[in-house]
Amino acid sequence: MKNIVPEQSRVYLPIAESDQVFPVGRIYCVGRNYAEHSKEMGDDPERDPPFFFAKDASCAVPAAFSVVTRIAYPMSTSQFEYEVELVVAIGKGGRNFTMQQAGEAILGYAVGLDMTRRDLQAQAKKKGRPWEVGKSFDESAPISPIMLKTDLLTDNVSKAEIGLKVNGDIKQISSVANLTWSIQEVICKLSEVFELRAGDLIMTGTPENVGSVIVGDEMLAWVEHLGEIRVSVTG
Ligand code: MN
């Protein structure tokens, strides 16, 4: 059979210090996985547990370490916000994982941004509508190269500093230890509602103090032990 339209392209993330790449399958995201961010969004972290949503795989933008990656200010918003997140790359698929299987499913880790059209997300929330307009749009997920898992890296990442600067000023800073659902718990719970596949990415949630950027701003996002990415917003 012949394609009637051209095949849409897939996004590949480099594996750090390797010539291999990671073909991005699905991108799952966790909402309100840091209590302090849950509060700033007007929710009660005791009453409202974290939950899942997704971005289209085409939202991913490979963001190399130590080079500035440019993303365009998106259409239809006047509140374009950053959320720095630890990203987990899945190397082994399956469903209904135990905690041990969840650990074994991890291929590696990356630093990512869950860029959000907050005004559109807020309208969707108010009307009980899906979040795609606020979350799943072109270039909304810049992600660093993937650092392959080792036992030491897993241990270090679980308590790593996570943060974001805009134009040199610290905006977000926290620790991965503050996750409401740990990395393995996130994978377990996700595998209870979706059969995971090798190639899937999970954005594990953002800490408090999200805020907006405008054209010309440069964000620097980091997770200790993984590295930092620089992402600038163009007109
Ligand atoms: Mn997020």
Image (tube, rainbow, N blue to C red):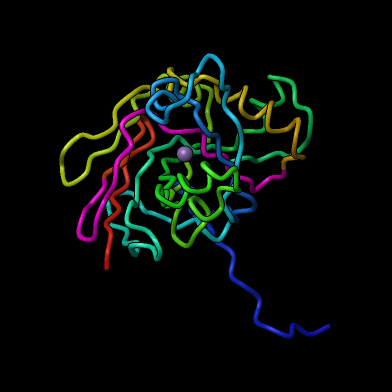
Q: Is residue 124 left or right of residue 169?
A: right
Residue at x 39% of width, y 35% of height: 226
Extreme residue in the left direction:
168
Q: Is residue 179 left or right of residue 27?
A: left
Q: Nearer the viewer, residue 32 or 25?
A: 32
- Could you say where residue 116 lies in the image, as x and y percent from the top left? 42, 49
Which quadrant: the C terminus? bottom left
- Could you say where residue 63 lies in the image, as x and y percent from the top left? 38, 54
Residue at x 44% of width, y 54% of height: 140
Q: Decide: is 66 above or below 52.
A: below
Asked if residue 222 lies in the magenta stretch, the reply is no
- Could you say where residue 114 lies in the image, as x and y percent from the top left? 44, 45
Asked if residue 216 lies in the magenta stretch, the reply is yes
Magenta span of residues: 197-219
Q: Magenta part mainly helix, strand or loop?
A: loop
Which quadrant: the N terminus? bottom right
Residue 99 placement: quadrant: top right
Residue at x 41% of width, y 40% of height: 111
Extreme residue in the right direction:
1
Extreme residue in the top direction:
46
Residue at x 63% of width, y 46% of height: 200
Q: Nearer the viewer, residue 47 or 81?
A: 47
